[in-house]
Image (cartoon, coloured by chain):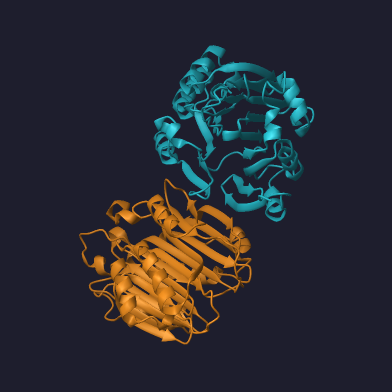
Chain colours: A orange, B cyan
């Protein structure tokens, strides 16, 4: 990815992740975020300090590979994930204006802003330096936001801001694995020294086998770093971002593919990247196929790892499971 | 309580709660925290900025009513709960020295430091002003401390610092209800205008019926405020502290009495004090009678209240349930 090209420098692979669910106070069926012009998206992303590198679509979703991570757009749902020193939260108010003025989507019925604790918070823009700063900004925009920190605030932890209001319960679920202290051998695949093309990295690494049948848009950065978006019919996506440099190695995996159990998927992801440490979050609402996944996760071990933290949050619409694992040093 | 005597002033009823479990590297059976001299406890509490008002004992435990809350001492376990502007964390290192030098208790095998978010953090001593400050102090003393915040960091939340290491699993459990926006009528009982003696306040309020059969040491402050300790055989205690002033009303209830279900107990406490808001924490380890209580709590409503937050933490030895409730305004 952009900043990762300088081997001397630390690169913050840790992403800021924003998901916004819109609706409209009018019944016009024409509301669709995908009608927003490319130029408008580019202007929005300029505020965030990143650029569109590639776009792929299916009937349900537009997926963009960005210079710093990814963006997904459906009719009424917006997902933006950006790493490095990007200023994602500066885009919130412009995004709400864009959705309202261009699509008549004037209601935000839920948002999820989340991120892992930064490795180097002091390198971030002032709006993102602490979670408290981020919450102050979000509280100015949203009246009833709820801010949580899961995990150990003095070690590894993960922050979340959401509205937690009663809402519609169309099936929804999101799984994220944020991984670091990565296996060097696996990470080498995501350098141009080893892989000639993004497609080669996707295949050699095993990424193409994680969720079979996805339509893939992948990108191998110069001299190293990797991003991919994958689409499946029905508005389902996967997205993977790799910062391979040994001194700041980091990989993120995210999907909203519904599964009753994520056990097999999680083990595939771990086998593909072999992190030394990872944290996992699973959101599932009451209508989701994954609604009881947290019960299985409470019982089942992840082979080769020790679970250091395990927390459950019961929100009005969603269950959230947070777990943090480390591989014991042998 | 001390600071509560000035009706013009805000009083921070919110307690800082410290629990330390000691053991010894030698087999000498003489180790006993209860052998520590009264003078030594007074010196320790002087650092914290509070005083002993009263002491009660049974064969398992010494219970002290303090000018700001309570202290409990068993053979190898120490509990200190202090409110107002007390400086509890300044006592940690002196306490460890006292336990080691006077009793040979040279190992701390677990600690729990917890508190609700202060209503007025700016009035606290610098060591207690933010949870981050408190964690920095504790991290200097303990190598592997784990710091958590449960609940909404931008609304009401509760902080915990613990060691979370594998340890002995003698049955153990602790229930705490921290209540505020209290019923004025109930609070009036804890003023000398209404109650002539502490015993009268204990009886009239219904406190004496919450856990029947306890040996009670109660104290009614001038002109208002109330503290009580209760002891039961086997090292079990209850403790209640009341700040009745309408502009800063606050009540805490805590017990380690083992019960398979705390449903009835919780309802008794709520009926006694009628808070507008309360948070509840339940710790139970694997050997505890209460080990499955969190499953019941996930399902059962608390009558008359809405649950705004519900979180579970699975530690190595303990399960912890955190819930926050409000009474809807009718």
Query: Quadrant location of the C terminus of chain A?
Result: bottom left
Is residue B237 visible in the rendered image? The answer is: no
Residue at the spot 61% in from the left edge and 33% down from the top edge: B246
Query: Quadrant location of the N terminus of chain A?
Result: bottom left
Residue at the spot 71% in from the left edge and 56% down from the top edge: B299
Residue at the spot 51% in from the left edge and 20% down from the top edge: B45
Residue situated in front as seen by the camera: B46 or A24: A24
> Is A8 rendered above or below residue B158?
below
Position in image of residue A2 (x %, y %): 25, 69
**In the shown orientation, is residue B167 left or right of residue B263?**
left
Say which quarter of the image contains residue A170: bottom right
> Is B112 rendered above or below residue A25?
above
**In the shown orientation, is residue A286 left or right of residue B93?**
right
Residue at the spot 63% in from the left edge and 16% down from the top edge: B54
Say which quarter of the image contains residue B71: top right
Say which quarter of the image contains residue B188: top right
Position in image of residue A11 (x %, y %): 28, 61
Is residue B82 visible in the rendered image? The answer is: yes
Residue situated in front as seen by the camera: B141 or B225: B225
Position in image of residue A248 (x %, y %): 30, 59
How many numbered marks have been drawn onto this rendered protein structure?
0
**In the shown orientation, is residue B58 left or right of residue A246?**
right
Residue situated in front as seen by the camera: A74 or B139: A74
Position in image of residue A277 (x %, y %): 42, 58
Give the farthest residue toward the bottom. Answer: A59
> Is B127 rendered above or below residue A108?
above
């Amino acid at each position: 990815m952009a900043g990762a090209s300088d081997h001397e420098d630390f690169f913050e692979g840790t992403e800021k992740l924003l998901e916004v669910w819109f609706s409209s106070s009018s019944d016009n069926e024409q509301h669709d975020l995908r009608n927003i012009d490319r130029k408008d998206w580019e202007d929005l992303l300029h505020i965030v300090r990143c650029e569109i590198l590639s776009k792929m679509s299916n009937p349900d979703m537009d997926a963009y590979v960005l210079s710093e991570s990814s963006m997904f757009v459906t009719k009424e749902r917006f997902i933006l994930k950006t790493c490095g020193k990007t200023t994602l939260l500066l885009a919130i108010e412009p995004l709400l204006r864009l959705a309202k003025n261009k699509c008549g989507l004037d209601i935000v019925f839920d948002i999820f802003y989340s991120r892992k604790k930064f490795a180097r918070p002091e390198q971030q823009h002032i709006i993102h330096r602490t979670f408290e700063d981020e919450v102050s900004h979000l509280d100015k925009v949203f009246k009833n936001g709820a801010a949580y920190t899961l995990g150990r605030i003095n070690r590894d932890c993960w922050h979340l801001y959401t509205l937690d209001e009663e809402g519609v319960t169309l099936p929804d679920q999101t799984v994220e694995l944020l991984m670091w202290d990565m296996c060097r051998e696996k990470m080498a695949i995501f350098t141009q020294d080893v892989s000639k093309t993004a497609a080669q990295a996707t295949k050699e690494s095993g990424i193409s086998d994680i969720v079979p049948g996805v339509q893939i848009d992948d990108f191998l950065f110069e001299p190293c770093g990797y991003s991919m978006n994958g689409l499946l019919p029905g508005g389902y996506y996967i997205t993977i971002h790799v910062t391979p440099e040994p001194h700041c190695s980091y990989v993120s995996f995210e999907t909203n593919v519904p599964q009753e159990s994520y056990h097999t998927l999680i083990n595939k992801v771990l086998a593909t990247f072999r992190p030394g440490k990872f944290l996992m979050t699973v959101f599932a609402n009451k209508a989701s196929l994954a609604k009881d996944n947290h019960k299985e996760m409470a019982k089942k071990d992840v082979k080769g790892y020790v679970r250091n933290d395990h927390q459950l949050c019961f929100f009005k619409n969603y269950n959230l499971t947070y777990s943090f694992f480390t591989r014991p040093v042998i």
